[in-house]
Image (cartoon, grey):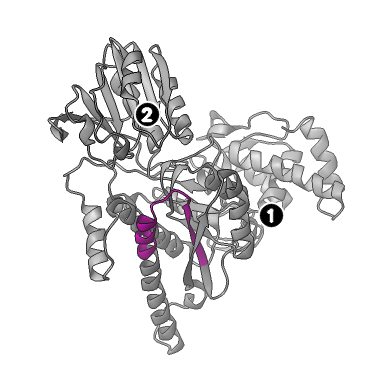
Amino acid sequence: MIRNGALLLAIIVLGGCGGGSPEEDASADVVTEAGERMYRDGILVSGEPMTALVGGDIPIVGTQFSCENCHGRSGMGAAEGPYVVPPVAGQFLFAPSPQPERPAYDRDSLAVLLRDGITPSGRALSTELMPRYEIGDTDVDVLMAYLENLSPGNSPGVSDEQIRFATVVTEGADPDAAAAMLAVLKRYAQDINQQTRNESERWDRGYSPESKLPTVFREWVIDEWTLSGPRETWEQQLETYYKNAPVFALVSGTGTGSWQPVSEFCERNKVACLYPSTEMPYRDDRDFYTVYFSAGLLLEARLIAAHLAERPVTKVVQVYCDPAYEPVVSQLRESIGDASTHNVSFDCERPVPIEHINEIAGENSAVVLWVRAEQLEGAPDPIGADVVYVSSTLTDAWPPVGLADDDDLFMAHPYRLPGKVDPAARRFQAWAKSRGVEITAPRLQAEAYFACLVLKDAVKHMGRFFIREFALDKLDHSESLAAFVPMYEQPSFGPGQRFISKGGYVIPVAGGELDTAGASYILP
């Protein structure tokens, strides 16, 4: 948090910053932080929110209409309905523009634009689209300093010939499933590279009409980053991989437990992380760079909580053996409200302690089993609770045999209903068959294929500007890709959304079979 911001930053701006000494570098960091808060959050140097007028006379708070809301995290602009929002990144704003023609902005013309909505060419911008901000001179200086260094050039991982990606496979991942995922990624990259070579040859021979092609086409390289050993060492392993061969983005990926170490690496290094197949996504409220299919087990916990709210349950017993699932246990406990909760942890090498569970459960109780299918098979006794829940993700989307005869057994399921036609999955199957890719891990491979589609779409729309934030800004507006999302119900995209599927099902189990007709779709 910046204290005495206006006075401090006025001194910094007047004295210059970035001269190379430790004190000047620290000053530059302060200016950058303040400019970032203004651009992204609409917070002035003083710590107060911006105030502005929209539509000529409608007052708004700047936090509701920050620069980022329209111009994107990258500052590269976007399309808003029928309107084109121009880029404000320094390489565009502080250079002349031919479309429409205008001189380059400087400090004074930027102040006029922000306060009065007038461009350097004298054109008045629509008050419906461009607010008029109440902003002081120091604020203008700080925002200008931030914009000058916003998206200055291509991100790491991009050369003139290649664009490099990586996929992460963590310890605990099924090696056969991981290999199946990698087969999809490698084959998709092979297809892209063949197309790139063909287009490059067309250019060399004068057959291509696109003058920009030599600056656009890159060979895709996809590395495998394998994380092993204690989780506390994964951060350093990721940093070592990145130092040796920086990547533009992480694509797909698989593993068990929380994705937190990978997510934190992506946020720290500003690396786009696109659609890892993880049962436990991790996201801080301000995270930007990692995008998931759904919240995984955390979503399942909220689905169960919503389902329990309709039942007369006063006690909830959660059962797990892996400490990695403790955030899921906490999520359900926070979501169920008044019901008392009890946790039962056990050794993962031993069967589920049903006798102990029954001693705790009693009347008006629910038991939630955060365990894998193999730990439940052959359970000796039924669970003595009014309702039992299992996880579709952990039990591989089918009721475990040992619990098939339990009364009131339900499965939390964050995917499409089993047996429901999935056009997107069929597209993947057709692609895989045509390329000789064996499907041995259907969900994981379909998710990897979609991650590649997203990557291709982002690269295509970036043109010659290979900027990570620009790619993610483009993804925010990729609603047309929703039809290609496999396995998940009601996918959607939008600015700031980092889970494209927000809901799921609670499916009853009857006679050892999933009763999909009785399933409830829940949007927590």
N-terminal of the pair, mark 1 or mark 2, is 1
Asked if the stretch drawn in magenta spans residue 161, the answer is: no
Q: Are marks 1 and 2 in contact (CB under 8 Å)?
A: no
Q: Quadrant of the C terminus?
A: top left
Q: Is residue 221 left or right of residue 370?
A: right
**Closer-to-camera residue (356/269):** 356
**Closer-to-camera residue (420/228):** 228
- Amino acid type at image mark 1: Glu
Q: Is residue 310 left or right of residue 108?
A: left
Mark 2 packing: few (<14 Cα in 10 Å), some, or many (20+)? many
**Horizontal and vertical percent for residue 324?**
48, 36
Any mark on residue 301, and which? 2
Q: What residue appears at the point 80 percent right and 45 percent down from the top-left corner?
A: 26
Residue 512 vertical position relative to residue 30 in the rendered view, above or below: above
Q: Quadrant of residue 492?
A: top left
**Highlighted range, magenta:** 164-184
Residue 54 vertical position relative to residue 356 in the rendered view, above or below: below
Residue at the disc numbered 1: 148
**Closer-to-camera residue (125/228):** 228
